[in-house]
Image (spheres, grey):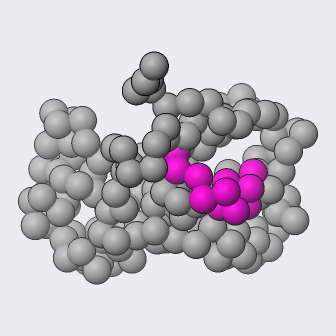
Amino acid sequence: METTAPSLVLAGRLEAFSLADVLQLLAAGRRTGILAVEREEPPERAEVELVDGRVIRAERSGAPDRVGTLLLGRGRLRPEQLGAALERRAVASRPLESVLLEMDAVEPGDLAEALVEQIEETVAAILSWREGVFRFRGALAPGAGDPRPLAGVALDTQEILLEAARRLDEWGTRSVH
C-alpha cells in the first residue's frame, strides 16, 4: 500500500540532542525532508529543508522575508519590486524566492548569494536555541516529488555548521560542538 504523506523519521528535544548532531546525522544519511524546530521562550519556529543531506532552505518565523531584506540592502531589488513580489506570494502561496525569479526582479546569482546568507544566519540562530523540540519529516521515495533547490543553492551541511560555529563565536554564544 502506497502512502503520499511524508513520514516522521526523527524527533526529540533540544535539551537532549544537539541540533548540530541531528543535522550531521541527516547529512550523513543523505536524507531529504524538512527539519522543523520550535521553542517556547521566546516563541519561534524554524525550518531547514534538505535534499540528499544538503540544505536548500532555512527560514525562521522571526525573519520571514530575510532574502528580500538582504537583496534590498545590496541594491539588487527595489522596494516596489519587493512589494509586488510579496503581494504575488500571498496570492500564490509560493516562496518569495520563486516569485522574484518568476518576475525577473533579481538575477539568479544575486538571489543565490542572498539565499546562502539567509541559510547561514538561520542555522546559526537555531543552533543557539537551548530548549525546544525538533521533528524531521522525510520524503518517502527519492526522486518522487523531491523539492528542487532555488537558484541552484544546495549547501553542504558540514560547511554550514562550521559557518554557524564561527557566527556563534562572534555573537558570543557557544552551543555548537
**Place of residue 22 in the rendered image (x, y in percent of width and height, measured from the top left):** 75, 51
Q: Position of residue 20 (x, y in %)?
A: 76, 58
Whether residue 62 can be seen here: no
Question: Does residue 157 lie above or below 22 as drawn?
Answer: below
> Which of these two is toward me, 2 or 75?
2
> 57 and 68: which one is in front?
57
Residue 42, x across and y down, in percent: 69, 35
Q: How many marks?
A: 0
Q: Is residue 29 magenta?
A: yes
Q: Residue at x 38, y 51 (%)?
A: 143
Left/right placement of residue 39 relative to residue 30 reads right
Q: Nearer the viewer, residue 17 or 130?
A: 17
- Location of residue 8 (image quadrant): top right
Which residue occupies the extreme front position in the image?
1
Q: Which residue is at 46% across, 60% downward?
A: 56
Q: Quadrant of the C terminus?
A: bottom right
2 or 7: nearer the eye? 2
Q: Is residue 50 visible?
A: yes
Q: Is residue 28 above or below residue 167?
A: above
Left or right side of 165 for 84:
left
- Span colored in magenta: 22-33
- Indicate whether residue 123 is drawn in magenta: no
Residue extending furthest toward the top: 1
| Percent of width and height locating residue 140 | 49, 37
Q: On the picture, is 63 further left or further right than 73? A: right
Q: For the point 42% across and 46% down, which residue is it? A: 64
| Picture quarter with the N terminus | top left
Locate residue 103 relative to residue 132 in the image: left or right: left
